[in-house]
Amino acid sequence: RIGDHATKICNSVVQIGDKEVPADIVRAIDDMNLLSLKIVDDATDALFKKNIELANTTFARRDDLNKRIRVSEESVLGLKSDLSVPVGIILDSIERTSDYGCNIAEIAINSAVSGSNP
């Protein structure tokens, strides 16, 4: 599912093409994307290391990311639709990627508590 969202992001970038996206939005998307990937990486590490503390950090990061996404969505509303639609899809895919990371973190916690292998 994460790979599907990576594909959606790539398709949206192609759709944007050479249209100019404001630099502050590009920076915000880059930062949010990195945070989303950090959530997935940490959740995966937590799963294999049975690290409940690391798994729990993903939820706080996701909350922070979701707040950032809401702010960015407001600024995207001011763009023309040929930009706002693909940028909105990118933001949605970043958010969903972090959600999947938190799903992995939940599995990590359950696995650590039960003593089972992932």
Image (cartoon, helix red, strand yellow):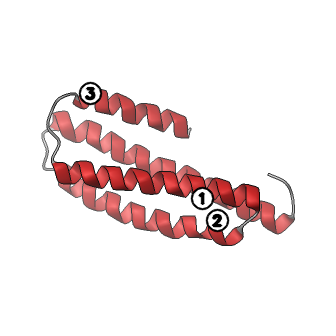
Which mark identifies residue 42?
Answer: 1
Q: Examine the rendered structure and indicate whether residue 55 appears above or below residue 21.
A: below
Cα–Cα gap, marks 3 and 2: 35 Å
Pinpoint residue 95: horizontal percent, then vertical percent: 43, 51
Earlier-in-chain disc, 1 versus 3: 3
Cα–Cα gap, marks 1 and 2: 7 Å
- Are the residues tagged 3 and 2 within 8 Å (C-beta)? no
- Are the residues tagged 1 and 2 within 8 Å (C-beta)? yes
| Amino acid, disc 1 | Asp
x 30%, y 32%: residue: 13
Could you say which quadrant of the image residue 115 lies in?
A: bottom right
Give the structural element (helix, strand or loop) at label 1: helix
Q: Nearer the viewer, residue 7 or 82?
A: 7
x 81%, y 68%: residue: 113
x 17%, y 42%: residue: 21
Assess disc 3: are there few (<14), some (14-19) or many (≥20) residues with their C-alpha within 10 Å of its C-alpha: some
- The quadrant the N terminus occupies is top right
Q: Residue furthest right?
A: 115
| Amino acid, disc 2 | Ala
Q: Examine the rendered structure and indicate whether residue 80 appears above or below residue 51.
A: above
Which mark identifies residue 15?
Answer: 3
Which mark identifies residue 55?
Answer: 2
Assess disc 1: are there few (<14), some (14-19) or many (≥20) residues with their C-alpha within 10 Å of its C-alpha: many
For this view, does 10 lie left or right of residue 98?
A: left
Could you say which quadrant of the image residue 85 lies in?
A: top left
x 46%, y 36%: residue: 6
